[in-house]
């Protein structure tokens, strides 16, 4: 890419391609694109760039593996203070009825 107009065109074409998550200019003269994404079709993207810029080539295609972040161990629950107050006891006494009523069937 020899001018800023060509760079802008290339960035626009690459940014709207399917699966692209990041586009950046790369190289000592900022004449190369570094495109990151998931499921990017490199051949289709190169063809789209050739239509707009007349020249495009693939230099490197590689899978970028993310390094897993270390997982922090779960934190122990914070101590809770529970105050239990004794409940007052209630006493009940069962007293039989001294004169039971006669049982009648109607």
Image: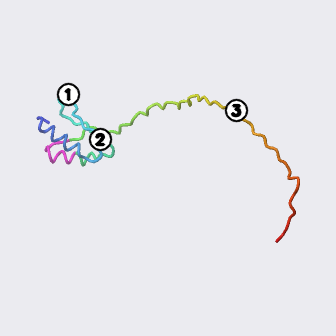
Foreground disc of the pair 2, 3? 3
Q: Quadrant of the C terminus?
A: bottom right
Is the Cβ of the residue at disc 3 closer than 8 Å to that at disc 1? no
Numbered disc in front, either 1 or 2: 2
**Of 56 and 34, the residue lying toward us:** 34
Q: Quadrant of residue 7?
A: top left
Instruction: Report, in whole angstroms, how far the alpha carbon at label 2 lies from the one at label 3.
Output: 63 Å
The image quadrant where one finds the N terminus is top left
- Disc 1 from disc 2: Cα separation: 23 Å
Q: Are marks 2 and 3 in contact (CB under 8 Å)?
A: no
Instruction: Say which quarter of the image contains residue 33.
Output: top left
Q: Residue 26: where, in percent of width, then height?
A: 22, 32
Mark toward the start of the polypeptide (1 vs 2): 2
Q: CA distance from mark 3 to mark 1?
A: 79 Å
**58 within the magenta span:** no
Mark 2 highlights which residue?
Answer: 21
Residue shown at 86% from the left, 51% from the top: 96
- Closer to the N terminus: mark 2 or mark 3? 2
Identify the mark nearer the N-term, 3 or 1.
1
Identity of the residue drawn at 25% across and 38% down = 23
Q: Which residue is mark 3?
A: 86
Local crowd size for mark 1, using a 10 Å CA cut-off: few (<14), some (14–19), many (≥20): few
What span is colored magenta in the figure? 46-56
Indicate which label's residue lies in the foreground, 3 or 1.
3
**Residue plotted at (12% across, 35% down):** 4
Per the image, the residue denoted by label 1 is 28
> Which residue lies at the image location 27% right of the left edge and 48% below the top edge?
18
Residue 29 placement: quadrant: top left
């Amino acid at each position: 890419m020899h001018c800023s107009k060509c760079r802008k065109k290339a960035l626009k074409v690459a940014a709207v391609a399917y699966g692209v998550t990041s586009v950046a200019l790369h190289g000592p003269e900022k004449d190369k694109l570094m495109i990151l994404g998931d499921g990017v079709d490199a051949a289709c993207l190169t063809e789209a760039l050739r239509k707009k810029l007349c020249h495009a080539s693939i230099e490197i295609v590689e899978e970028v593996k993310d390094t897993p972040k270390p997982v922090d161990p779960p934190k122990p629950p914070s101590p809770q203070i529970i105050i239990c107050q004794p409940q007052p006891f209630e006493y009940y006494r069962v007293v039989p009825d001294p004169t039971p009523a006669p049982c009648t069937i109607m």
